[in-house]
Image (cartoon, coloured by chain):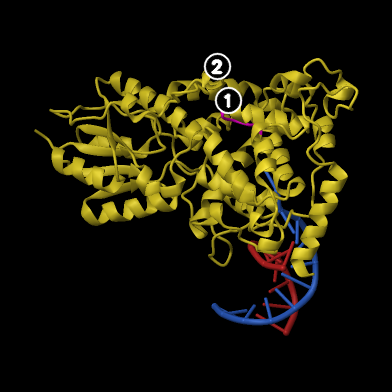
Chain colours: A yellow, B blue, C red
Amino acid sequence: MTAPHIVWLRRDLRLADQPALYAAAQEGPVICVYVLDDEGAGNRAMGGASRWWLHHSLQAMDRELGKHQGKLILRRGNAADEIAKLAEETGAAAVHAIRHYEPWWRKAQGRLADRLDLKLYDGNYLLPPGTVTTGSGDPYKIYTPFAKSARQCLPQREVLDAPSLTNPDEWPDSDDLDGWNLLPTKPDWASGFRDAWEVGETAAMAQLEDFADRVKDYEDDRNRPSIDGSSRLSPHLHHGEISPMQVWDRLTRHTGEGAETFRGELLWRDYTQNVICQFPAYPSESYRDLGGEKLWRNPNRGHVIAEDLEAWQQGRTGYPIVDAGMRQLWQIGWMHNRVRMIAASFLIKHLLIDWRHGEQWFWDCLVDADYGNNGVNWQWVAGTGVDSNMFPRIMAPLSQSEKFDAGDYIREFVPELADLPDDQIHDPDDKHRPDDYPAKIIGHREARERALSAYREAKGE
DNA sequence: GTTCTATTCCT
DNA sequence: GGAATAGAA
């Protein structure tokens, strides 16, 4: 009868390179538990797409534990309360968890540490957020110097193998996963998701292998939406089915420009955590005030934005590249990174809608929705962020579409346009535009001028 | 050693 | 505009 050790899982649903699980397994029998805590996250409760992914990821985690004759315990409610309750129920010696930096998780970690022996480990980032500092000891705000400094500290630690596990004498009760209703019910919007993704640790490792074969072409292919050039690791990384250190380690053999650029993308993940550690409300509030109320169109000032917002959400703006991106998001819960920038820029500048509406939509629709990444990337496009002010740089969606060769991408996700020739696909004229595809919601030149004059006006009359 | 300032650059 | 750094004061 040795006291069991609880491993509190969150977005770290893996056996390998999982420092909390690894440490707990050294100590004694292990009970892995996941708590669904919508209340603690408040308005940052997981969106629909993330919940779809979570369902399958929890299933996969239970399967992996099953290979060791173990299982995953599920509980629902306030995470700190539920973990404390479970610890008491099972007479656990300690609770082990990977440290997370979203404000609600920091709060829950603090509450739990007051009540029991909570052992926290770093493991979901290449370097523990807050540890890379400027010459004067402050945390970085700007990506480039951050990444330069971080690169010099890497690699930091060894990748851990999956530990061998001992089971407790008795398993505590567990919720039934299906009872959580994480999957869609009435309209089944997830059929595209099922075709696009394999969820879980095994699938994540396979995806890494697949990407390792393609990383040499990453430099060019990552910007071409119709090519399978990006890693597609983001949802696996977000849910912690694979650790960034495993990815870094696997790619260290690759020396080319592509691998170097991709390592920069992994460091971007670390960077966004550093930003939200310094500014916990960053994903919900502009860091730099560009004129606030005056800049964006606002129902309080008589602007009707609901229709434009809806057209953007549904992929009916009349700009094929934007519409393809938004429909890809709806169909598979993910959007190509290049297109994310084009679509975000379009909402903010062409439609002059507050970036936070876009951030919310992405939060709900992305299987890789991540508090730090989503917030930092939206503020980057909006020009309201910690880095330079990008607002006056207005992307031209039509030339972006041509430049990055998005023709086949548009054909895939905007089927009305599938038959258009290359010279019409990016910007169909009235003769070629099918009846069921909308005309442009606003002309590019007109939108550009509206945005720039609103910007000048908001800045200082 | 500490503060000031010039310079460079911002996924 | 302001963050980061390096070199001056």
Q: Residue A408: image x %, image y %?
A: 76, 20
Q: Amino acid at mark 2?
A: Asp
Q: Which mark is residue A332?
A: 1
Is A335 in the magenta?
yes
Tell me where residue A177 appears, x and y as whole percent: 32, 26
Q: Quadrant of residue A429?
A: top right
Q: Is residue A223 left or right of residue A443?
A: left
CB under 8 Å between discs 2 and 1 = yes
**What SS does tag 2 mark?**
helix
Residue A21 shown in magenta? no
Which residue in the rendered view is the most extreme toward the left?
A1
Q: Could one spot residue A397 in this view of the protein?
A: yes
Q: Where is residue A315 shown, x and y percent of the image?
A: 69, 31
Q: Which residues are magenta?
A: A331-336
Q: Does label 1 lie on the same chain as label 2?
A: yes
Query: In the displayed structure, would residue A444 be above or below residue A148?
Result: above
Location of residue A417 by image quarter: top right
Residue A316 marker: none
Category of crowding for the residue at label 1, using alpha-carbon neighbours closer than 10 angstroms: few (below 14), some (14–19), many (at least 20) = many
Q: CA distance from mark 2 to mark 1?
A: 8 Å
- Horizontal side of A186 relative to A445 (left or right) equals left
In-front residue for pair A261/A448: A448
